[in-house]
Amino acid sequence: MKPGIRFVARRLAALVLLLLGITFVTFVLTALVPGDPARAALGPIQGENEEAVRAWNERNGLDKPLPYRYLIYLGNLIQGDLGNSQASNTPVLEELATYIPATVELAVSSILVAGLAGVTLGVFAALHRDRLADQVLRVVSLGGMSMPAFWLALISLYLGFFLIGWFPGGGRLDPALNPPSQVTGLYTVDALLSADWAALGSALAHLALPTLVLAAHTVGYIARYTRTAVLEVIHNDYIRAAYAKGLHARTVVVGYVLRAALPSMLQILGFAFAGVLTGAVLVEKIFTWPGIGGYAYTSAITLDLPSIAGVGLFIAIVYVVVNFVVDVLYGVVDPRIRIA
Amino acid sequence: MAEPLLSVEGLTVRLPGPNGPVTVVDGVDFTVDAGEIFGVAGESGSGKTMTFLSLLRLLPAGATVHGEARFSGQNLLTAPAGELRRIRGRQIAMVFQDPMTSLHPMLSIGRQLTDHLRTHLGVNRRSARARAAELLDEVRIPDPSGALRAYPHQFSGGMRQRIAIAVALACRPRLIVADEPTTALDVTVQAGVLHLLDRLRRDHGVAVALITHDLGVMSALADRVSVFYAGRIVESGTRADVLRDPGHPYTDALIGALSHTGALRPLPGSAPGAAERPGGCAFHPRCRYATERCAADDQTLVPISPGHLLACAENPLTRPRKAVAP
């Protein structure tokens, strides 16, 4: 197990350096964005008042030189202080903490749906290569990938909510219900933990449409990748050897074929997850899902620098952490990497 | 004589090719008796491997198989899939050529040794692992219980082939098909693997179909030998018949190419691919005894002495040796 620990430690050290670099880039980029945060915050009338603008800049530290501001930012960051939102004056970390669980809940449920469906369809397509089922799946997955998510979101809301009325129109929970007592911030999990069945049902119903919309977009990628990964391993001797041992076809496909394809699928699964965690801005907006996407949108149009930097940092952390987890999983999945 | 363990009649295998189906095995007959080592000789592409893959129905998609293959009362080619699955690994096991690719690189040796044990024999995890350790010990893998937790890349080629043989042996099959089991191995470890196969045959009475192009291997182990050329058997008989007193010029040429004494006699040309099989005797373009008859007539196996079958029109070698020596 020792080499395993060293492996993880080395990756973790690289991760810290990477995050440091990312804070620098996000900081510089947000500082370079054209536009004057003071005028954006003070509004059109006060924004014309030079005195008020200078006072606002002084209050928010914007009169200091850029490198100095970066050091202050880093120093605060280490203490977990991401600054206060210039719009609401509440700590950015606090705001992120209220929005992130909603996004995580949506992302996890859609990656579960997309992963299950995508892997199943991909394996099926590979096993029926170039036959009708494969062709149909190719067209369908291409369709899913090329359909804009916001359009799919609008259509599904129109059909599912307005026309048929089976699904709620947006948000995370029926407004008549109280959110379940917070443990994880994921309503479904919290409702389960507190045995609040009404909240659970409502949370699931609210999750359904946005989950499907996000998944529809992702499932095509996962299916295609899985198909390729399976086709790469399926002609190996060890697969034929597994059949020759008299194992059930299901055991061979899941235990041998999929197992061998897993390392090359981890990457796409990781990126798909990072994608639904960070790229759901429009879908969240359309379903009025109180997640990080909506928050990013609002902070961007109000030029709320600390919030923008906070969202940027969140996105960076998501990608870095997902990459880290994928790297570690490679080692778990493939014994040859574990030793190296 | 008792009923043979495996009897194959008129086996024909066609694989899909770019210009329509290609016949890679063309009407092959042979039998394997319980407990014998049956040698299958021939160059690459002569249909040896396809013959045995077709018996377990492990051919690539699109292949068609005709003929009959009876294995202890069951017809392998028409048995329902579920029945065939219970024969695979349980009654007939395979050892593949390259031990670097025939073991799953990401699954532990223990898993690969026990999953079919559990499927076929319904034993629980603990006793399957105990049995797996015994098997590793039997094929002389040091520290069997440690090896169960290890992965294929931690072993050398020779050790991996021993492990692959242990996998084949796990359910005590009655026939092991060993497809070029030593070809991918260093010469120094080949002998060990062959000795192992021979010992298993003696200790457990398991029959071995030993597929190889190496007649040296054949002469060391096989009880009977069939020689394949371009999808057909051109000669078969006991080891002594075929290797010491070959009837077919092709067999003779193979032995000559191997001969450690005197000058090496390379066989001119190369074996025809399945698609460009010449008419008549497929070997005639390369045969130094060939006559017009050889190009015209298809040859069938006929006995030249009890148990020694030959498919050759001219039969140049069964005359006294001195007469044909150039």
Image: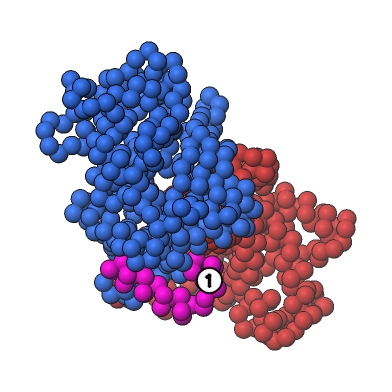
Chain colours: A red, B blue
Would you say the magenta stretch is mainly helix, strand or loop? helix
Q: Is residue A218 visible?
A: no
Q: Position of residue A248 (x, y in %)?
A: 57, 61
Instruction: Give the amino acid at mark 1.
Output: Leu
Horizontal side, residue A271 vs residue B209: left or right: right
The residue pinned by badge 1 equals B121
* Residue beneath the point at 41% across and 78% down: B130
Residue located farthest toward the left when viewing the structure as drawn: B262
Give the total of numbered labels. Answer: 1
* Residue beneath the point at 81% across and 64% down: A167
* Residue beneath the point at 46% across and 79% down: B127
Identify the magenta region: B115-141
The answer to whether B299 is drawn above or below residue B119 in the figure is above
Q: Position of residue A28 (x, y in %)?
A: 41, 57
The answer to whether A3 is drawn above or below residue B26 in the figure is below
In front of the other: A331 or A91: A331
In front of the other: B271 or B261: B261
Q: Quadrant of residue B254?
A: top left
**What chain does mark 1 sit on?**
B
In front of the other: B316 or A157: B316
Q: For the residue labelled by badge 1, is the local secondary structure a helix, a strand or a loop? A: helix
The answer to whether A299 is drawn above or below residue B186 in the figure is below
In front of the other: B8 or A270: B8
Residue A236 in magenta?
no
Q: Position of residue B229 (x, y in %)?
A: 38, 32
* Residue beneath the point at 30% across and 58% down: B198
Q: Position of residue B85 (x, y in %)?
A: 57, 58
Which quadrant would the C terminus of chain B be assigned to in this image? top left
Q: Residues within 10 Å of mark 1 (few under 14, many from 20)?
A: few
Horizontal side, residue A138 vs residue A267: left or right: right
